[in-house]
Amino acid sequence: MSQATGYGPSRDSGSRWKRLCFSGDENDYDLWETKFLGHLRMMKLKDTILGLTLSNATLDVDLDRNQNEECYAEIIQFLDDKSLSLVMREVADDGRKALKILREHYSSEG
């Protein structure tokens, strides 16, 4: 029996990971997006991918670009191959545009 070190995935992360993976079924897209945005909220990236900023705050362009790239890195981890193909060449490293493409694609299919 091995000792827990605090490194690596926890027991719960496996089931959470599975719940966050998109199946590619257009009927499930809205539910998946809601779960994914919740995931980004916990990572403090939701406002970045939605393009929201505080009206009285100065937006740091480098920070925004880096966070947008982080959003892209997160989103591609949870996509099926078909959905990944839609975004990987078109909008590499742009989480906002990737989410927009997915929304447009799956809303037109539904």
Image (spheres, rainbow, N blue to C red):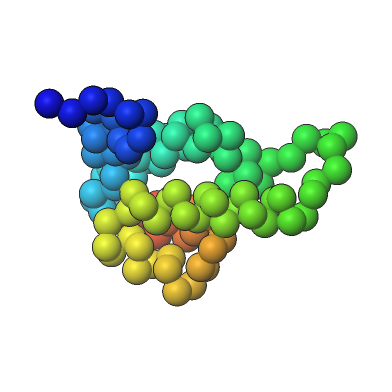
Query: 81 or 24: which is nearer to us?
Result: 81
Query: 7 or 47: which is nearer to us?
Result: 7
Q: Which quarter of the picture shows residue 82?
A: bottom left
Identify the residue shown where x is 78% and y is 35%.
Answer: 54
Going by the picture, which residue comes out furthest to the bottom?
89
Tell me: residue 19, above or below residue 90: above
Query: 3 or 82: which is nearer to us?
Result: 3
Measured as percent of width and height from the top left, residue 45 is found at 58, 40
Measured as percent of width and height from the top left, residue 31 is found at 34, 36
Tell me: residue 78, above or below residue 46: below
Measured as percent of width and height from the top left, residue 102 is found at 42, 56
Q: How many marks on residues?
A: 0
Going by the picture, which residue comes out furthest to the left?
1
The reply to whether residue 90 is in sight is yes
Identify the residue shown where x is 54% and y is 63%.
Answer: 93
Q: Quadrant of the N terminus?
A: top left
* In this picture, residue 23 sits left or right of residue 95: left
Tell me: residue 50, above or below residue 55: below
Q: Which quarter of the picture shows residue 87?
A: bottom left
Identify the residue shown where x is 38% and y is 67%.
Answer: 86
* In this picture, residue 78 sits left or right of residue 104: left
The reply to whether residue 16 is in sight is no
Tell me: residue 93, above or below residue 38: below
Measured as percent of width and height from the top left, residue 8 is found at 32, 38
Identify the residue shown where x is 27% and y is 26%.
Answer: 4
